[in-house]
Image (cartoon, grey):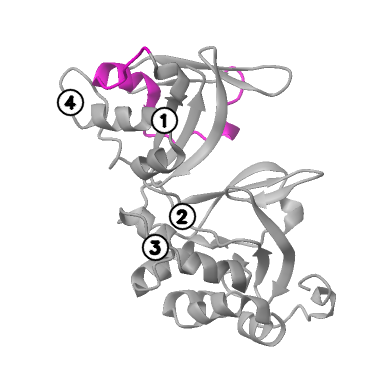
Amino acid sequence: MVATSMAQIPTNLTFHKLTTQYLPFISINTAYIFNDTRASQQLANAVDNPVTIFLSLNTPFQQYDATPPTSGAAGQIEAASVTSAALNSDLFQYLQLDGLHRSTSFNGTSFMRTRFNDTQYEHVSGGQNIEVFRNETAFYVGTGIGFKSNDLEFAGGILHIVDHPMAPPYSLGNTGTVLGINAIAGIIQASVKGPGPSVLPNIQNASDVTVFAPQNSALKNASIASPQVAGNFVVSGSVLYSTALTAGTSFLTAEKRKLFVTTNASGAIFVNGSRIVESDILTANGVVHVIER
């Protein structure tokens, strides 16, 4: 239904005309946008400040809209909290990228900076990012959210329609809880014990944090609840997405331990010999990579 009528849509319409006249299947999203002063002005002024925006179909948005908010500030935004105009406004900033980004501009894994930079909820310098992945067989944004129709042009902008609502990442603690990554709780616990001999920051509240979290099976006979141990799994002050983890690079942890990055022929990434088994889990203040040990 979405794809059949796309070719007939003019490309010089304002965002308001495009969505109200031709795209009734995203009308719930756009109704919220038109009620939000900041977002509606940004889209109305797109000719002067070009924008790319991601919006979902009505049905999944309605289901998502009914989801109770998760505890914690980032979790409240993540659940689309329609009871708060301020949180809704921030949510629409997360759906926007500066500039025009057609589907052909995405290749492999890309991390794109959004317009969401409210430091009350997010702590990534310059604004929170989204992940976009595209190859010969797959095209998705975030955690596997697929594209239903892409590259819809309006005056000053590009609209991509996706099959599920997008939302900012959880806080670090909520990420560990929701995804069942036990090491994150231990690292957070260690980071709030006070500076002592450790330089590990309070990573729940810090900005620009990368965590290399051992997978659950690696923790059976080990503990990372001390600052000295936990600090070896944290890079503070840098958000290191997988695109930055190239062979031959190295980084210092909070405990001044050097992490060396290597790769193999199949593209797997290793940090000090430990393979990354799940990469690029975005959080409100950075990114988590799950490692073997």
Residue marked by disc 4: 195
Residue at 39 percent across and 60 percent down: it is 77
Q: Position of residue 132 (x, y in %)?
A: 63, 48
Label 2 to label 4: alpha-carbon separation: 30 Å
Label placed on residue 168: 2
- Quarter of the figure with the N terminus: bottom right
Q: Are marks 1 and 2 in contact (CB under 8 Å)?
A: no
The answer to whether residue 197 is magenta is no
Residue at 67 percent across and 51 percent down: it is 140
Can you tell which quarter of the image residue 47 is in?
bottom right
Residue marked by disc 3: 68
Does label 3 or label 1 sit earlier along the sequence? 3
> On the rendered structure, is 18 left or right of 179?
right
Q: Nearer the viewer, residue 264 or 167?
A: 167
User: Dot 4 lies on which element?
Assistant: loop
Does label 1 or label 2 sit earlier along the sequence? 2
Residue marked by disc 1: 211
Q: What amino acid type should be assigned to the residue bearing mark 2? A: Pro
Q: Nearer the viewer, residue 115 or 204?
A: 204
Does label 4 or label 1 sit earlier along the sequence? 4
User: Dot 1 lies on which element?
Assistant: strand
Residue 92 can be seen in this image:
no
Q: Nearer the viewer, residue 164 or 254?
A: 164
Task: Tell me if mark 4 has few (under 14), some (14-19) or many (20+) residues whose alpha carbon lies within 10 angstroms of its own.
Answer: few
The residues colored magenta run 221-248
